[in-house]
Structure formats: structure tokens, C-alpha cells
Image (tube, rainbow, N blue to C red):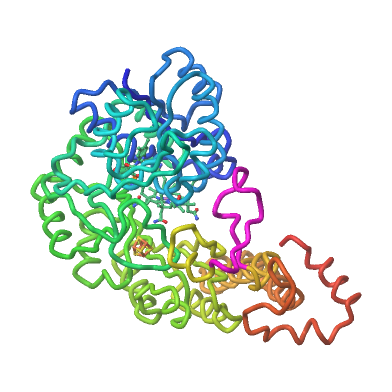
Amino acid sequence: MDLLLSHGYFLDEDPHERAVMKPYPPLGILYLSGYLKSKGFAVEVFDSTFSRREDFVARVAATRPPVVGLYCTLMTRKSALGLIAECRRLGSRVIVGGPEPVNYAEEYLARGADVVVAGEGELTLEALLPALAERGPHRLHDVGGIVFRDEDGQIVKTEARKTVENLDTLPFPDRGAIDLPTYVKVWRDHHGRGSVSLITARGCPFRCNWCSHSVYGYSHRRRSVTNVADEIDLIMETYRPEQVWYADDVFTIHKKWFFAYAEELKRRGRRIPFETISREDRLDEDIVRTLAEMGCYRLWVGAESGSQKILDRMERKTDAERMRGQIELLKRHGIETGTFIMLGYDGETVEDLEATVDHLRSSLPDLVLTTVAYPIKGTLYHQKVSERVVSLRPWEEGSDRDLTVKGRYSRRFYQFATRWMVNEVALERARRSSAPPAEKVQAVARSFLSAQVGRIGMALTSDEVEAGAGSPTGDGSLRSLAEVGTERLRQAALRIVGNTP
Ligand code: B12
Ligand code: SF4
């Protein structure tokens, strides 16, 4: 074996995902496996998702791969560091890649990785594996797209490598290298429908400030319509899933391509239910109708905020008002809408949060996922707030989700704000529902009370500042409520609404 590819994600260690149970394998390492095999390398994949840490160690101990390649994201950092240590103990060299390591190359090298790969991995690994075997890990100056330590221990970052020009030249992801049927079965057992993921393009040219572009930069390359349709045929014939997930960044980004693809699937007689992500500015009546005809049952549109001011600060380049119209449009065509809402972005005030709540109440998307903004290293957002970024945990124990911004409202404030927001949406849903009166009253009362607890909690914590002294960088318009009460009253009220909502 030349290379064992793996990733540090263990479902067993993720209680949240175990409750959701919608797993997919990381496509990146399957692409790498397919490509390297086509170039004559002997590659194996250890898919950690349904395994345990001990199984990975046992596999490395039994097969003694000369090189282990690990896919790492911000969420799998701690896990990956543990695997790196095990590989080193067992005598394997370690290459790390994916969106996270290039942001922390020095830290990964300091903790046992031999080489960090920046960006797309196919061409880099093809050049790196023989160089590593011939010259060891410290004389790799001529291999583009990597970071390593030279013989003096100095960190060397080599020239950026060109990306694969024509994505159609890549073999399909090597799904046969892992137990994909188990993923399909888990989906089927938990959701009644088996699902398989695929991607039709690489890279996104938009510049939403909080989004990580560490792998593909701002480039955008598409596969041809027939190449993607061929992969769909293969997936359907091999795994027979009841649906697919296009894991693209923005599925309808290229209108002409999209219509041609829809046409091609129709020509092949394929109407497959699917879920995917897009943007409000990449939708119109024709696109939405076509999405519905193709089998799209849920579209995530990433509203992020209902405040145009915040959308503009994020450089999201979307329009809050038009977004509400698009949700309407999707509903008319029978497509469920999912939105991702981000709270706490730089400069957000209580008025902006209110605008988001109003936005959600009026458009009422079917699904709302909330997150409190965290500045991923390497993003434009991180650059903007870099002087105020504080980590809540030591680097090797946490992730970029533990990065917070000094001076904004406290985490407790955002927990209350989230509670308020989520329950205002639930309240609106309950009000509009056609449930029997008793049930409806109960749902309205429950959501109303919970929303009020959130709102009062916000008022009581609105003078709490994240990681330091001073006033929150928001407008503090609710602060007066806290200021008029005595500290004892405030503490008593906090006990009533609960410190951790
Ligand atoms: C699909 C996906 C998911 C799926 C994951 C399921 C799965 N296993 O596929 C779901 C929906 C669960 C998910 C969740 C999250 N995700 Co996500 N996700 C993606 C997405 C959209 C596509 C991944 C993909 O398939 N890419 C296509 C392949 C071909 O590209 P690739 O993976 O980058 O692989 C290439 C290179 O990275 C490199 N490479 C990869 N592995 C290796 C290994 C070696 C050894 C080498 C040398 C090279 C190498 O070569 C590959 C081929 O060229 C990416 C964005 C993106 N476009 O990549 C975000 C992305 C990976 N997700 C991200 C985030 C932040 C999250 C969440 C934290 C979001 C949240 N707030 O909850 C969660 C975390 C979940 C968890 N517990 O880990 C960030 C990661 C940022 C970072 N610095 O780590 C990304 C980059 C989105 C973004 N632009 O900000 N995600
Ligand atoms: S959030 Fe979506 S649209 Fe914005 S830059 Fe990232 S991938 Fe592109």
C-alpha cells in the first residue's frame, strides 16, 4: 500500500449527529482515492464514520501504511490530532489536507503531521507521494501546494499548485472503497429513504465574509452535464437510493448549466427526489419550476439575516426582501425551504435581530437552523475582527467554533436571543396552523412563553460583554431594562428565566 486515506469523524463520538442520523461520507478523500488509483498508486480508505478510534489504530497497526492521509475540518481537529499521534507512534508518515490544516499549518506540523496540503489534493498527492518516498519529509521544495519543515526545522510553503482544469477528467468518487450501502441503510432506517451525495462543481466565487474558501479560493469550475448525469446513473444503478443530495455550494449558480442538466436527466428518464443549497439571487420562477420538476423537495437558501445592513456587512450580496418573495415562490411550487440564520455577526444590533425575527415570521420557512457567528481562520470575517478574536479553549482541544469576538454581546445573550427567535417562529407557525383549537392554544401559549423568556433573558444579559470589560458593541437598546433594576433583582430574574436557556 502507498497510502491509507481517512478522516477523523466518528459518529460514535457525535451525540448531535446520532440524533439526526443523516450521515454522508467525505467526498474529498473518495475523489483522491479514485484519482490516485487511476495513476497506479495502491490506496486504501479507512472510513471512520461508523467505526471506532480503536479500529483505526488496529488497521494502521495491521497494515503499516507508509503514509496516512487525513481529511481535516475545523470540527475534527482534536480527533485528527489524536490519529496523527497514533500514526506517528506506529511509524507512518502523515499528510493532512482539507479546509482546516492550511489555516494552521504550523500547529499541525508541530503536532506530528509531516506535510500539510493546501487546496485541491489530486495533483499534489500524485507529486508528493513519490517525493516523500524518495526524499523523506524535509526536502520537498519542488512539490507545489504544500507546507512542510525543511532540514533546519524552518517552515516552507511551496508555490501554489494549479487546480485540475477539466473536472471531467477526474474519475468519479471511489465509493466502492468504503461501505456506502451502510450509509444508504442508515438513511433508510431513520428517514424511510436512502440517500447518496455528489457534487457537480468546485469552488464558489461569492465572498460571504464568514465562509471558508481555503480549498478552492474564489474559483469556480463545473463538471459537464453528461459527466454528472453519468455519475447519477451509476449511483442509482449501484446503490439504488430513494434520493440524492447535491452537496454543491450553490446548486443553481449557473443558469444555463442548470437547465441543460435538468434536460439531460429528463432525457434519461430520471426524476430523483433531492435536497440541495442555493442563494436567493440564483432563483427565479423558471428555475424553481424546473427544480420542482426535477424532484427537489427541499432547498436550503441560507438567509443568514433579515437585516439588509447585516447582509451588506457580510458581503452576502443578497436582498432580504427578495428572499421573502423567493420563499413564497418555493412554497407555491411545493418545495420546502430551509434557512440558516447567523446571529452575532459584527455590528449586529438588537434592531437587526428584530428585523431577522420579522423576516422569519413573515416568510415562515419550513426549517430554520441558527448559529452564532464564529470567525473561521482565513476568512474575510476573521481578518476584519482579528484583533478582537478570543479562543474559549486551547487550540488543540477546541475548534474554530470556539472562537468568539471580544466586545460583542455575551454567549448567554445569544442563547436567549436564539430562544426568542426560534420560539417567535414557532409561535407564528402555531398561530397559522389549522390544528384543533385546544392543541393550537397550547402550542401558541408554549411558544409565546418561551419566546418571552428569551426576550427577557436578552434584556437581563444585554450588558454582558463577551470576553472582557466594556459595553457590548451592539446598540445596547435593551440595557436600560437591566439598568433600572437592582443587581439583586437582575440575578433573581435570571434565576427564573434560567442561566442556560
Ligand atoms: C458536504 C459538507 C458538509 C456535510 C458533511 C458530510 C460529508 N461528510 O460530506 C455536512 C452538512 C454534515 C456539513 C456539516 C458541517 N460543515 Co460542512 N461542508 C460540506 C461542503 C459543502 C462540501 C464538502 C465536499 O464534499 N466537498 C467536495 C470535495 C471534493 O472537496 P474537499 O472535501 O475540500 O476535498 C478536496 C480538498 O480539500 C483536498 N483534500 C480533502 N481531504 C484530503 C486529505 C488529504 C490527505 C489531502 C492531501 C487532501 C485532501 O482534496 C480534495 C479533492 O480535491 C463543504 C464546502 C465545500 N465546498 O467543500 C463544507 C465545509 C467543509 N463545511 C464546513 C463547516 C464549517 C461545517 C459545519 C461546522 C457547519 C455548522 N455550523 O454546523 C458542520 C460540521 C459538521 C461536523 N460535525 O463535522 C466548512 C469547513 C471550514 C473549515 N475550515 O474547516 C466548509 C469548507 C464550508 C465553508 N465554506 O465554510 N458539511
Ligand atoms: S456562503 Fe455559499 S454563496 Fe457565500 S461564499 Fe460561501 S459557498 Fe459561496
Q: Depth check: give the residue in front, 442 or 232.
A: 232
Residue 140, above or below 366? above
Is residue 445 something one can see in this rendering? Answer: no
Of the 4 image quadrants, the one containing the C terminus is bottom right
- Residue 101 is situated, as x and y percent measured from the top left of the image, at 45, 45
Q: Inspect the magenta stretch and tell me whether residue 257 lies in it.
A: no
Residue at point 57% right, 45% down?
16
Residue at point 14% right, 59% down?
257
Q: Find the residue positioned furthest to the front.
A: 152
Residue 130, above or below 417? above
The magenta span reads: 386-405
Q: Depth check: give the residue in front, 251 or 390.
A: 390
Q: On the picture, is 334 further left or further right than 438? A: left
**Quadrant in which residue 24 is drawn:** top left
Residue 85, above or below 242? above
- Residue 401 is situated, as x and y percent measured from the top left of the image, at 56, 55
Residue 93, above or below 315? above
- Residue 225 is situated, as x and y percent measured from the top left of the image, at 13, 50
Q: Depth check: give the residue in front, 488 or 396.
A: 396
Q: Depth check: give the residue in front, 142 or 469.
A: 142
| Labels in figure, total | 0
User: Ligand 2 is in which quadrant of the figure?
Assistant: bottom left
Q: Find the residue positioned furthest to the right.
A: 488
Residue at point 51% right, 24% down?
88
Q: Find the residue positioned furthest to the top.
A: 62
Is residue 223 something one can see in this rendering? Answer: yes
Residue at point 25% right, 47% down?
161
- Residue 83 is situated, as x and y percent measured from the top left of the image, at 52, 30
Q: Inspect the magenta stretch and tell me whether residue 394 lies in it.
A: yes
Of the 4 image quadrants, the one containing the N terminus is top left
